[in-house]
Amino acid sequence: MSVEEEAQLLEVALRRFLQRLEAEDPEADPARREALLKEAEAIGLLTDPDPEAPGFATGIWGRWVWAERLGLSLHVLARLGEACAGFALALHAQGIACAALEGARVFPRGTRLALGGLLTDGISPSPFAGEEEDGLRLTGPHDHLLLEGRSWFLISAGPPQGLLLFARAAEDSSWALIALPADLPGVRLEPLPERLGLRGAWMGHLHAGGVLIAREGVARILARGEEAHRRLRRLLALDWLGHAAIALGVARRSLDQARAYARTRYQGGRRIIAHGPVRSLLGTAAADVMTLELLLKAHAEQPLAALSEDVLERWAAIAKLAIAEHAWRAVSNSLQVMGGYGYMEDHGLAGRLRDVSTLRVLHGSPDRIRLRYAE
Amino acid sequence: MHPELLDAIQRLKPLGRWLYDHSTETMWERDTRTLPRDLQRRRRAYRRFAEQFIAPLAREADRDPEGVDLGPLYREAGRRGFLSEAAPWPIGTMPWRAISGRHIFHFALKAEEFCAACGGIGLALLFHDLGMAPLLLCGDLGVWRRWLWPICRANRRGEIRLVAYAITEPEAGSDVEESEGATSARFCTVARKVRGGYVIQGQKVFISGGSRADYVVVFAVLEREDGQPPRVDRDFTAFIVERGREGFRTGRRERKLGQRACDATQLFFDQVFVPETHRIGPERSGWALNRNVLNYSRAVVGAIALGIARGAVEAATRFARETRLGNRPLLAYPEVQVALAELWALTMAMRAMVWQSARYRRPVQGIAAATKALCADLGVYITTRALDLMGDWGYMPAWGVEKALRDVRLNPIYEGTNQINMLALVESFWASDLAGVPYPQIPSEDRSFGRSL
């Protein structure tokens, strides 16, 4: 079966899955979220670290994306974002972590993974930086390395069982990518259940104190130096592209909902969609959605392997900034069209505003991203 | 201040030194000093109360609005005179000097200070002022004696009596806040005249304080004697209904995005009888009364946005001082300084507009509407930029900025959406600055389209 045929089959499965995702609220009940994750795993949407598992190729940021085209994952994330942005982020997080492995067999089938250490170079400021060197550090001789420090805002499909962490070597500040089980002595995960939005994913901080990284042990180094840095840049770019795709889904659904409301609601004897100020809000939102769509299409037809880190990173940075510029405005305008109903949590728009507000700063504040890409 | 600059100031002539402002007082204190004495005292009192009683409850009241008992807060606010400012001393607590034209200023100062500590608790204290406004603005001495004064007296004693204001209906929100919409609004709350009073039938939604208020000022269209269908613009009439009156009940408390400490509740009126003494103002005068209440309250809603935005800017500034990046505080970076400076400047601009709007002896529709709409939009802009500056930490509840964003997002919606307020501004200008230009009419086919359904 060709990739295109498989993609069509996946699209059919995705449609059925979205109906279920719409009907059940995975943010409200962890048991339902787990059941939905199992189903996503079965149909190959949830990426798996095991190369024999279905999700290894077809899952988000799976092998297909490397060999065929990036648009496959962007499309799925946008569709998932329409239904539930938090759940979309959960699948995205698993995909990013699997992408860090680049096919290496490290974790068994079905392991829930989280990727840490991406927030580097001041992409997101830390209230603790300066007290001690921020981030994760590797110390000690080659065959007996110790991992120490903290990593912020890890995301996973559930409480993570495996971790992929970027750390700097204390001696020369070179990068290393480390894989380790989450229950290793010295690893502590601090969940962050209370936050503005995207509550369908697991989020937490990682604290590492004297974690032993041995050459042949359960915790090991997957890449070092330039290779690790290359992977870091690539994964950060994929992370931002994923956020932008989810935000597109959130904005698209918000606009659809606001249009439907404006077609049926009356004010002053006319449907509100006939009122100039409302049309202006909807028109601006529609233009914002289309702008983000076009932006995400820029390199969507190319395989990930064909894009250089520079091109990928620039594209991802602009897409990430477009969340704040376009997706957020589209959602806010849609909420405004629905007035009081939009502000109530039961009608969906309020949650979408929370989600898109979180996405605009998740893993990188717009201000820091602008500064970083000034040149 | 730079030491060289201080030396240079000292070298000026005495009068030159006096003319040079090199005070190290906070901007808040300097702004306060520009106000008349009574307002200075009030501003400081509001701030003390907000810091002492509102701020400590803010996070928990947002997280679990029904689990936090605001009763002691209301009693303290009542004893301090913050729930009886609709009437002057000795009945209420509004200074006599303010009656001549500064009373909106008091409410605006209160709104900013309370909402800088918490938008939700701020609203939970402020909805009462909105409910009291029609009792005051109807200009009816009988209403003042029967309702306004006893409520003020009780609140001063700490025996709290709260009043909510009920306009919005499931099918009519903005309609009743805009002239064109009012002629064909689908208004379902209807009053029928009966012997000795009126019978009210209908439903209201999203009523701030609806589940807590002891009284509700409810607007209904009064049935016409000529058999014509009643209209908002011709037949609107206000009534006060006490909690416990037969047929009056509260429904669902909405789950709101923000300002969660203040409930937004459904109210049901099922054949509620009220005596004539419960009518606020003359029959069919409600349209004017509602408009005037909105003219009075919209500057205060602008001040609510100002307060919430100020709270977010203060939190972002604290974050920038305490957070380090590359071994320097964030605040040491010029780009962070410029970004924060923009937010401070916009907050000052909002305050200037609110204060200017509050200076009018009687509020001007267009200016009140412009203040409400512009401050609401700026409030949303400022809080989202504060969130941006904090990166990932912005969406965590500890700093309060995500809450401020959720809170202030209500401001472009309530008291008429911002779009309705802009139309109110134009309408106001049509009678003055645009006098002589024919008022645009909605095409008749559009009107008939809505009516035929």
Image (tube, coloured by chain):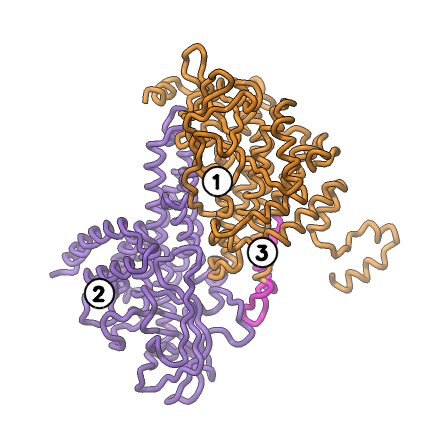
Where residue A2 sits, quadrant-wise, is bottom left
SS assignment for the magenta stretch, majority: helix
The amino acid marked with disc number 3 is Pro
Graded by Cα atoms within 10 Å as few (under 14), some (14 to 19) or many (20 or more), the crowding at tag 1 reads: many
Residue, disc 1: B211
Q: Which residues are magenta?
A: B321-347
Graded by Cα atoms within 10 Å as few (under 14), some (14 to 19) or many (20 or more), the crowding at tag 2 reads: many
Chain that is orange in the image: B
Helix, strand or loop at disc 3? Answer: helix
Magenta stretch encompasses residue A375? no
Magenta stretch encompasses residue B325? yes
Q: Specify the subunit that label 3 lies on.
A: B
Is residue A198 or residue B279 the one in the foreground?
B279
The amino acid marked with disc number 2 is Gly
Nearer to us of marks 1 and 2 is 1
- Mark 1 and mark 3 lie on one chain; the one further toward the N terminus is 3
The amino acid marked with disc number 1 is Ser
Residue B245 relative to residue A252: left or right? right
Is residue B394 or residue A278 the one in the foreground?
B394
Q: Position of residue A47 (x, y in %)?
A: 25, 65
Please name the color used to draw chain A: purple
Whether tag 1 and tag 2 are in contact, CB under 8 A, the answer is no
Q: In the rendered image, is residue A311 in sight?
A: no
The residue at 72%/41% (across/down) is: B39
Quadrant where the C terminus of chain B is found in the figure: top left
The residue at 54%/46% (across/down) is: B379
Residue, disc 2: A55
Q: Position of residue B40 (x, y in %)?
A: 73, 44
Residue B308 relative to residue B22: left or right? left
Residue, disc 3: B56
Q: In the rendered image, is residue A211 in sight?
A: yes
Whether tag 3 and tag 2 are in contact, CB under 8 A, the answer is no
